[in-house]
Image: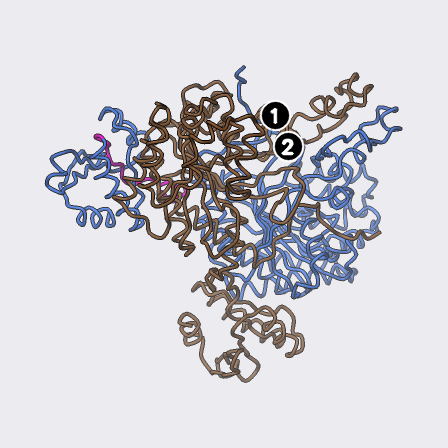
Chain colours: A brown, B blue
Amino acid sequence: MAQKPSIPKGTRDFSPEEVAKRNYIFETIQSEFKRFGFQPIETPSFENSSTLMGKYGDEGDRLIFKILNSGDFLKKADKNALAENDSNKLTSSISEKALRYDLTVPFARYVVQHQNEIEFPFKRYQIQPVWRADRPQKGRFREFFQCDADVVGSKSLWQEVEFVQLYDAVFSKLQLNGVTIKINNRKVLSGFAEVIGEQDKLIDFTVALDKLDKIGEEGVKKEMREKSISEEALDKIQPIFNLKGDFAKKIEVLKRILEGSEIGQRGIEELQFIQNAIEAMPLKTAKLDLDVTLARGLNYYTGAIYEVAAPDKVKMGSIGGGGRYDDLTGIFGLKNMSGIGISFGLDRIYLVIEELDLFPKTVTENTKVLFINFGESEALYAMKAVSALRREGIVAELYPDSAKMGKQMKYADKREIPYTVLAGEEEMNNEKFTLKYMKSGDQLSLNLEELVKKLEMI
Amino acid sequence: MAQKPSIPKGTRDFSPEEVAKRNYIFETIQSEFKRFGFQPIETPSFENSSTLMGKYGDEGDRLIFKILNSGDFLKKADKNALAENDSNKLTSSISEKALRYDLTVPFARYVVQHQNEIEFPFKRYQIQPVWRADRPQKGRFREFFQCDADVVGSKSLWQEVEFVQLYDAVFSKLQLNGVTIKINNRKVLSGFAEVIGEQDKLIDFTVALDKLDKIGEEGVKKEMREKSISEEALDKIQPIFNLKGDFAKKIEVLKRILEGSEIGQRGIEELQFIQNAIEAMPLKTAKLDLDVTLARGLNYYTGAIYEVAAPDKVKMGSIGGGGRYDDLTGIFGLKNMSGIGISFGLDRIYLVIEELDLFPKTVTENTKVLFINFGESEALYAMKAVSALRREGIVAELYPDSAKMGKQMKYADKREIPYTVLAGEEEMNNEKFTLKYMKSGDQLSLNLEELVKKLEMI
């Protein structure tokens, strides 16, 4: 019986046009990664569950797709869990593998496993899909690609600088001018918590501050008060609610607020180093901005924190982000490996480029010329020309069947193939081809050599 | 506690060098697919289980990786299956999704689901990983890429011709000269069975014949006898055991054997059509050969059957295969959609190219020049030059830390970076850079413009 075909929710089919557009973005990112000296690695789609579980918090663990053991999996099943009807407890006894949840943990695993083959500092990039059992919604999928570049094995701030340049290079190449690269530093956030005497509330404090954009100053303060942050503390950090002006101005304000915090001062120095370098080597089209409310992934970032905002005229969440994490590989037993990395949000970048109509027209071009099929001997005559054109790199096709002319023309039309070639008995006798420009209907009679030349030019 | 990191058996990590080599093969195949007018699609890594199950036989069903339902999956579990401890029966109630097993069934699903958006004949290519819970062994993995090109919606034999040309184009481009494209036709095999009066034993017959290479004529005959194929039948087909000579000669022998079989004659006509076309449009480097023992995937092939053998000097199984299947989409409710397609075996092609040392040296080239880091102000001076070089497309890096010179040089050496640039105080004062060729130790003193030009040339 025939099934009505469908795909799992949160997943997508990609049409030829969509694949072409996505590949354009992938290839642009990849070519900049390479130009900056990053090297590609790839890791398996599924890892041992023990590699992934416990690395993303409880919520993350729940969102990891688990693969059922093959064969008679009930043999090894936890009998107690079965008796108690406890799905959660049962899982590890019937599933030993799980789909990759991000590229960072597999990268850490890779570095530790292959540490003797790697020259450090190791600059790697990785462009592969990840899977999350998240509730699907607009712009959020259960399968999506991540595009990551990371360096491990050095604490040099030149890497912080280089990632700003890399973002600028990629978005400039994509003609996505006017993105804002927002930067912050975990040490500055720690400094705030220290200055207001609430070190133990660092997370509550930054989580609230991170919402400034959405809920405004009063909303943030309300949430801070709910977390028992004192009025005195709020007074002390008041200036950060309306940090204005350029990078240098903001740094001046921060210096005053963080006067009493050593860690805060170090954070400021790091930010200033980056800013100085970028000033000395101006960005092409992006803007660097200091945003002290930025706290993404605070749990593991230890220094720089990045986030990229689309150009102002587009409403879209962040299209990239990253930061420095001082102990990437510790979970797998390799200590003192500082890492820093950034990620590009492919799906959102796609939407922004689409909205701004910035995909080059050439990206979705496909077949340039369709040869109309008039029957067996004409088709052979045509196929010889098709082969000659392909040798010159021109995408040419023969309509496979000698269907009615109208049907073949309609096919060329629907597929947006700009040229057709008609070669019937008369053309064959004269060793000619009739080239037709579909849009205007103009026709030219050409021999093979002329046909190749013509199609190479147009 | 630190875990000793490892990956699931049958899966692989790919190092930068391996990724570069694999991408070279992928990109070559992809560019030929495009040149022949094939368009890319992509489908999700996992499908609804109902899409995949029952499509690959019982053995296939067992080898499909199933994904455990998220959340409290025991809630919907089949209580009887649990009581009976029946893993097989339980599976469908706790797993609704499964990893793609090949690209053909998802493609069929795609065609049916998107039939109203597609112009037929539809030429699509797809390069994505598939997963099989096979026992891992040398050259057989649980995750591997398939590279498929198919056409659906036409029965034209020009497609059979085109796929021969496509194989030739790809392997020629890869400089893998001298592959043999073996071709057969299901109708010829049916003809044999008809002529010997054993239509009902077609599968037994062809499965045995397929082993001629491995077990020889006597072995094949022994197996056929065990399947109750008569001595008289074996006598009739005796000539196929030592088919010799070129394509045309073999066709002559087949014509005699299959004189009494209409379907057999049709198979011969199809083979002859392909041979005639290829004779009129000679292949670049591949050889087309008729191999009547070829039976791969007989269950679904209905016309042409292809298999590609590596050049004689390399011992390797087939590096590609495919065929025509007259009812690709019927399982999903769309009838009368003839399809034909071929596949490239990436992993084996990789091994063959490696063995013959045919990877172009440029494939694994990475960073061209490393700037030695002498401290903060020198590093900024260097980074400006690095940025200028990158703008010209030259892959340049700054060593991130001002480590000891020897360490930095060793790093360049190990990463096989051919050039280093030394720019200390003296160079800065003179606005110069010292370019060093690592292999010879030769040095040149250049200004920025000269440096860019020099590195562009070499």
Count of numbered marks: 2
Which amino acid is tagged 1?
Answer: Met
Range of the magenta residues? B358-375
Residue at position x 60%, y 36% in the image? B143
The chain ID associated with circle 1 is A
Residue B338 colored in magenta in the image: no
Instruction: Tell whether A33 sits left or right of B109.
Output: left
Q: Considering only vertical position in the picture, is B159 above or below A191?
A: below
Q: Are marks 1 and 2 on the same chain?
A: yes
Element type at marker 1? loop
- In primary-sequence order, the first of circles 1 and 2 is 1
Image position of A308 (left or right of B309)? left
Q: Residue at x 67, y 60 (%)?
A: B152
Q: Position of residue A411 (x, y in %)?
A: 62, 71
Q: Is residue B287 visible?
A: no
**Residue position for label 2:** A64
The residue that mark 1 highlights is A53
* Mark 2: secondary structure: loop
Q: Nearer the viewer, residue A370 or A189?
A: A189
